[in-house]
Amino acid sequence: MKNKGFAKTKKEIKLMKKSGDICAKALKKVLESVKPGVTLEELDTIAKEEIERYGATSSFMTVEDYKHTICTTVNDQVVHGIPTHRALEQGDILGIDIGALYRGYHSDQAISVPVGIVSKEDEKFLEIGERTLNKAIGVAKVGNHIGDISATIQNGVESAGYSVVKSLTGHGVGKKLHEDPMVPGFGKSGTGPKLEKDMTLAIEVIYTQGSGEVILEKDNWTISSEDGSLGGLFEKTIAITKNGPIVLTPYL
């Protein structure tokens, strides 16, 4: 099956690499300020200033009615949290989702991190998410399928005793923040669209310690776990090359 329109040109990938570098630098700057007492709004301001310092703008501000540079999720929140005046507390788990728009091309990435010292159980939860994302990126090779990525995410999360949030998904990325194909966090190897050279994807591991079921909060943005369990999010933008996947948002 040919996926006409999914692949990018060399010039487009070069611009997306620049976008991803800016995004990664901004995320690194935000992470340097994560500590008890810092507010989510303050982190948002840091991200905005850093992205703009490199000549880019926030990808997320291209989403209708969204007024912030980043999404921030704390503890049982999973995705799309609005940065508020809430101050971080010792033991929180903070998710930061960030995107940069540079010369018409988007990048998208996310990480979940501890605030100060957290329990061994929560450390393991975060470690599994990051490790699973890296494994999923590893199978994003020419000739494989979207289902190979999806199955790797599902196996990594569920084998550790956690649950994938099946109603949320990774996606293609480029001139639009969200493009086809969708990249679910669950599925069967060998199924779905075939992965082709020069495709660009935002691969996401979205999961919880509990059931994986989610609810939309009253702010109409924040999605939280239905059972109040801890949520996690890890995401990187990649390009698929003839020599394998390359990460366009190298925050680590």
Image: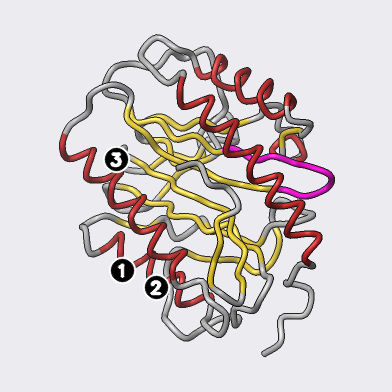
Q: Is residue 74 left or right of residue 19?
A: left
- What is the x, y in percent for residue 99? 64, 40
Please say if 78 is above or below 152: above
The residue lying furthest to the top in this view is 37
Describe the element under mark 2 as helix, strand or loop.
Answer: helix
Give the distance between the C-alpha atoms of the residues marked 1 and 2, in whole angstroms: 6 Å
Which one is in front in this view, the residue at disc 3 or the one at disc 2? 2
Residue 210 position in % (x across, y down): 27, 49
36 vs 125, left or right, is right
Disc 3 target residue: 229
Count neighbours of disc 1 (C-alpha within 10 A) and say few if under 14, some if 14 to 19, many if 20 or more: some
Q: Are marks 3 and 1 in contact (CB under 8 Å)?
A: no
The numbered disc on residue 128 is none
Q: Nearer the viewer, mark 3 or mark 1?
A: 1
The span from disc 3 to disc 1 (Cα, nearest Å) is 20 Å
Q: Secondary structure at mark 1?
A: helix
Decide: is 112 above or below 148: above
The residue under label 1 is: 155
To which residue does mark 2 refer?
Answer: 151
Give the residue type that dot 1 points to.
Asn
Which sits in the foreground, 66 or 200?
A: 200
Percent x, y of residue 35: 38, 17
Q: Which stretch is magenta?
A: 98-106
User: 18 left or right of 245?
Assistant: right
The dominant secondary structure in magenta is strand
Residue 151 vertical position relative to residue 72 in the rendered view, above or below: below
Q: Residue at x 79, y 54 (%)?
A: 175
Task: Give the mark nearest the N terminus, 3 or 2.
Answer: 2
Amino acid, disc 3: Ser
Residue 196: quadrant of the picture:
bottom right
Residue drawn at point x = 78 percent, y = 42 percent: 102
| C-beta proximity under 8 Å, tags 1 and 2 | yes
